[in-house]
């Protein structure tokens, strides 16, 4: 019985004492990777769990079975996109990418000092040239690419755009990365080695700097030269017409004054000019303007007065004698 029991017990496979839950899951993940991957080349990453698993692009690629998770101490034979690289990815790296694939370091940009770069990587460590991120965390920021963007950039620069599109198509925002950097990626694809890519990058950045400076100067000039920003721009011909109209109105609305500073209205002045174009204005002893009507009344009064005086003088002619007595004429 005992032997039978022992024999039966020995025939039953025992779990290895070194096999833990983490190793079991890692083996299953590796097995899943080898079975489900359909990507044309090898993909790998060193994951330091710095990122949110729900937002980490590297972990999503791992869940999809597209990328292999490397342990610290393991080396990779393909291109390793790493901040520890000495040169930049260039079209001449195409053969290495096709033969041995590409790898990235999955870590936070804010915690690079925690990454043991001396224990990871490989013979072909590369930097990425200037590119702009399109991911949801660092959208629009240069250099701040996540894992899938870094891999896609590597493939695009060496000329494998279809690989970059295939990888990015797993993300809703992914293809926007290629659209944002389309012109710049074409510039890098036209280069050959790492030095030519670096030169193209520097020329591009100098161009951006000049454009920024010109925009600042242009905006500064506009701020002071364009006048009131709330006022619509007026055509120069319209301004000239309006100025001429204003001058004509000013000429028409010129005001005249008499000797005492009284305003002579346009209507009365024009009426007087029509009635007495050839007559000179008349003034009294105090300098007041005498209108034609007043002048006529004064003249009529003076004429009546002179006629009465003449009659009275004729009627009142009196004679006196030598003694001064009045002689009444019959």
Image (cartoon, helix red, strand yellow):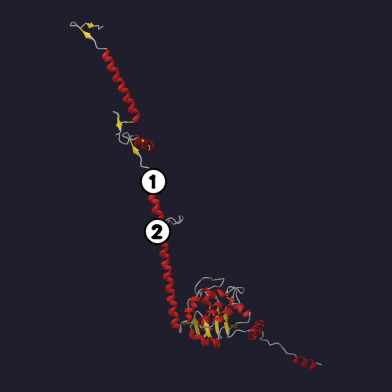
Q: Is residue 123 visible?
A: no
Q: Quadrant of residue 296?
A: top left
Location of residue 299 in the rendering, given as x and y in whole percent from the top left corner: 31, 25
How far is the residue under mark 1 from the one under mark 2? 30 Å
Closer to us: 49 or 166: 166
- Quadrant into which the C terminus falls: top left
Location of residue 324 in the rendering, given as x and y in whole percent from the top left corner: 20, 7
Q: Quadrant of residue 36?
A: bottom right
The earlier-in-sequence mark between 1 and 2 is 2
Q: Is residue 326 visible?
A: yes
What's the residue at 40%, 59% (across, down)? 225
Decide: few, some or many residues near mark 2? Use Cα within 10 Å; few <14, some 14-19, many ≥20. Answer: few
What's the residue at 43%, 68% (across, down)? 212
Q: Quadrant of residue 228?
A: bottom left
Residues marked 1 and 2 touching at CB (< 8 Å): no
Q: What residue is pinned by disc 2?
A: 225
Q: Is residue 72 above or below residue 134?
A: below
Under circle 1, the secondary element is helix
- Quadrant into which the N terminus falls: bottom right
What's the residue at 38%, 51% (across, down)? 243
Q: Is residue 5 left or right of residue 297?
A: right
Q: What residue is pinned by disc 1?
A: 249
What's the residue at 42%, 65% (across, down)? 216
Closer to us: 112 or 89: 89
Under circle 2, the secondary element is helix
Q: Which numbered dot is residue 48?
A: none
Q: Is residue 286 above or below residue 270?
A: above
Taking the view exactly as shown, the residue that stands out farthest to the right is 1
């Amino acid at each position: 019985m005992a032997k039978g029991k022992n024999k039966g017990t020995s025939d039953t496979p025992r779990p290895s004492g070194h096999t833990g839950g983490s190793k079991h899951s890692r083996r299953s993940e590796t097995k899943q990777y080898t079975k489900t991957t359909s990507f044309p080349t090898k993909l790998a990453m060193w994951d330091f769990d710095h990122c949110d698993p729900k937002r980490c692009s590297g972990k999503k690629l791992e869940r999809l079975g597209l990328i292999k998770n490397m342990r610290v101490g393991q080396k990779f034979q393909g291109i390793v996109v790493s901040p520890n690289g000495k040169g930049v990815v260039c079209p001449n790296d195409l053969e290495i990418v096709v033969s041995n694939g590409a790898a990235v370091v999955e870590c936070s940009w804010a915690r690079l000092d925690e990454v043991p770069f001396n224990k990871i990587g490989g013979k072909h460590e590369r930097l990425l040239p200037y590119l702009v991120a399109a991911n949801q965390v660092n959208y629009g920021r240069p250099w701040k690419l996540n894992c899938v963007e870094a891999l896609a950039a590597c493939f695009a620069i060496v000329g494998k755009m279809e690989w970059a599109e295939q990888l990015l198509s797993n993300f809703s925002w992914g293809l926007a990365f290629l659209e944002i950097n389309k012109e710049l990626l074409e510039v890098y694809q036209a280069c050959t080695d790492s030095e030519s890519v670096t030169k193209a990058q520097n020329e591009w950045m100098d161009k951006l700097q000049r454009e920024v400076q010109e925009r600042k100067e242009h905006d500064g000039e506009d701020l002071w030269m364009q006048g009131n920003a709330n006022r619509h721009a007026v055509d120069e011909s319209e301004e000239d017409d309006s100025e001429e109209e204003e001058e004509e109105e000013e000429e028409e609305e010129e005001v005249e004054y008499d000797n005492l500073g009284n305003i002579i209205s346009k209507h009365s002045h024009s009426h007087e000019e029509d009635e007495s174009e050839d007559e000179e204005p008349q003034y009294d002893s105090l300098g007041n303007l005498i209108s034609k009507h007043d002048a006529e009344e004064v003249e009529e009064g003076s004429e009546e007065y002179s006629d009465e005086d003449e009659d009275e003088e004729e009627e009142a002619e009196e004679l006196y004698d030598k003694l001064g007595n009045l002689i009444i004429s019959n």
